[in-house]
Every structure is written in structure tokens, then in C-alpha cells.
Amino acid sequence: MWRVFLVAAACALAVPCAFSQDAKKQSDKKQDTKKTEAKQPPPPGKLTVAWHGQSFFDVTSTKGTVFVFDPHAISEYGRIEGIKPDVIMISHNHNDHTQVGIFENAAEKGDKAPKIIRGLKPGDDGRETWNIVDEKINDLHIMTVAAYHDEFQGMKHGKTVLFIVDVDGWRIVHLGDLGHKLSKAQLKALGQVDVLMVPCGGIYGLNGNEARDVVNQIKPKEFILPMHIGNRRYDELLPVDEFIDDNPIKCAVIRNDVLVYSKSPATNVSWLREMERTPYDNTLVLERDPARKGPVIVNLHYWPQADRKKKK
């Protein structure tokens, strides 16, 4: 009898202990979950990116900071209006990348004047050298990486820089007029890229196949935006065809704020020609899509569709 009583007593004492251990485990689990959630970065903001032909993009952050890359004043693209940049980035000093005077606030002084970041500067010997930048402006973190405009260490076309902009949880890289594959050091400096603006029109920089090699080196996560290419308005460069022809990376255009995808890599070029018969947009809103596996090549139009309709 005493033996039964002792066993029952021991079980009764063990039950609160078991409940206590379970409660502690649940509490620890909740704390671990909170710690994990605290470590998770916030979702990236929705940025607006617009292409204006050549290597000229303007981007607006969620806080309203407007930054532009490589502005031009090529007459075939018409007059660019309505952009008041806070920051202007110039990858190199060829005149189709340096036209800061086209902006409405170009003549402003003091805080209202746009901040101009030039990728190149005069060296001690009077020749151009790289302006290595690592600077925070408003909600932007801007860096530059030294590169060349050609495969002969600048002997043909000179130097250029690669711009890195970290903003709203995105890393945007603009390759300027890059003319060669990247070194390990350059790739390390670029890090994990979300949005890549890549020249692929040849003649003065990477052609389509060379651009594909560089994209494969960088491995951007989300968006690839072809630039410095020829088109019906400006045919001094090669079209994007060689870059997208049978490219296994998905190709798309923006129409009514929606990505419209090519049906097959084998028909990318003919599909894009068909898309050009009806309006598609020069503006992309950056959003991550968990359902899309891998990056997408977005072929932006070369001017805003409202302007296109006016010019018909």
C-alpha cells in the first residue's frame, strides 16, 4: 500500500514539473521567433525607374529622392521635361552621358541645386582618373567601382565607373559604358545586385554576347535593364536583339504597369518586334515577386508613352 502511495505522489510531483518545462520551451520558442523576426530586414520599397534612351535613367525612391544616371540631350529622343533630380551621376565624360543642363533645376543654387557625382576627375598628371566614391546622400548610399570603356584598359575609349546605389532595400548597379568582363575584385565590390543596368549595343562598349557574359558573372537577383542600345529612333548602336536572342533569362516589357513576358527564349526577338507595334512603357515599378524564379530582362521603351502619342 505504501509503495502505491509513494508512486502516486511521485507522479503528482512530476506533473507540475512537466508543465513547467513545456511552458519554458514554449516561452523560449516565442523568444527565438521574435529574435528571428527582428533580424529579418523590412521588405524593399517600391521604386520607380524610367529609361530615356542611351544610358539615361531616372529613379525615385519611396522618400521622394530623385536620382539620375548619365543624362543625354540626343535630339532623336526629344526634349526631356519634368525631372528635377536631387542627385546626378555621370559615369564618364562623353557628351551623351553628361548633359546636366537639361534638368529644370540645373541652374538652382545651394540646397536646391542637384548634387553632381562625376565618375572621373583630373589626376595629378592632368589625365582623367577614377573618382572613387563612398557617400551617403539623403536615403541613398552611393559607391563607384573603377572600370574601362573598352577591352584595352581604356586605350580606345578611356575610363568609366560602375555606380552602386543602395536604397530602400535594393542594390542598383549602373555599368556605365563598360567595355570588358569584370575581375574578381570588381565583382566582390558589386556584391549581390538586385537591379542591373547593362550596356549591350556594342561599337563603344559591350555587345549583346559580351553583355550576357557580364550578366552571368554578376548574377543579378531581380531585374536586368538593357541600355546603350540602338532602336528605331536612334540607330547608331546595335539593337538589343543579340542580347535577348534565345536568352534563357525571361524577357518582358511593361504594359499598363504589368510585366508581359515572352513565350519562349527562341522567339524573344520576334516577340519584341511585335510588342513595338503597340505601346509599352518606359517606366518600371520595382517589386519583388516570390513566384518568379530568377531575374527578368525588362525591355523598357525609350520615351514615356504620353510623349509617344503626342509625336505620332
Image (tube, helix red, strand yellow):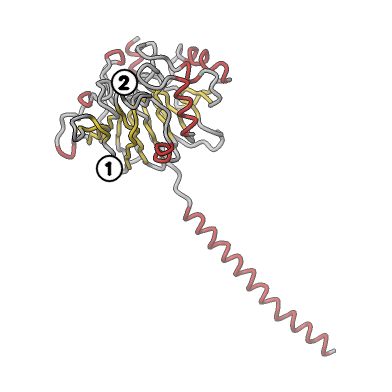
Which residue is depicted at the point 54% across and 58% down? 33
User: Which secondary structure lies at badge 2?
Assistant: loop
User: Which secondary structure lies at badge 1?
Assistant: strand
Q: Quadrant of the N terminus?
A: bottom right
Q: Quadrant of residue 224?
A: top left
For label 2, the residue is 156
Nearer to me, 232 or 209: 209
Q: Quadrant of residue 309?
A: top left
Q: Is residue 254 left or right of residue 235?
A: right
- Tell me where residue 46 appears, x and y as whole percent: 41, 37
Which residue is depicted at the point 51% across and 59% down? 34
The answer to whether residue 15 is above or below residue 86 is below
The label shown at residue 137 is: 1
Estimate how packed mark 1 is, as few (under 14), some (14 to 19) or many (20 or more) residues with alpha carbons within 10 Å. few
Q: Is residue 163 left or right of residue 107?
A: right
Return the residue found at the far bottom. Answer: 2
Q: Is residue 149 left or right of residue 187?
A: left
Q: CA distance from mark 1 to mark 2?
A: 34 Å
Pick whichever of labels 1 and 2 is earlier in the sequence. Answer: 1
Q: Quadrant of residue 19?
A: bottom right
- Residue type at mark 1 is Ile
Nearer to me, 257 or 177: 177
Residue 47 in sight here: yes
The answer to whether residue 80 is above or below residue 126 is above
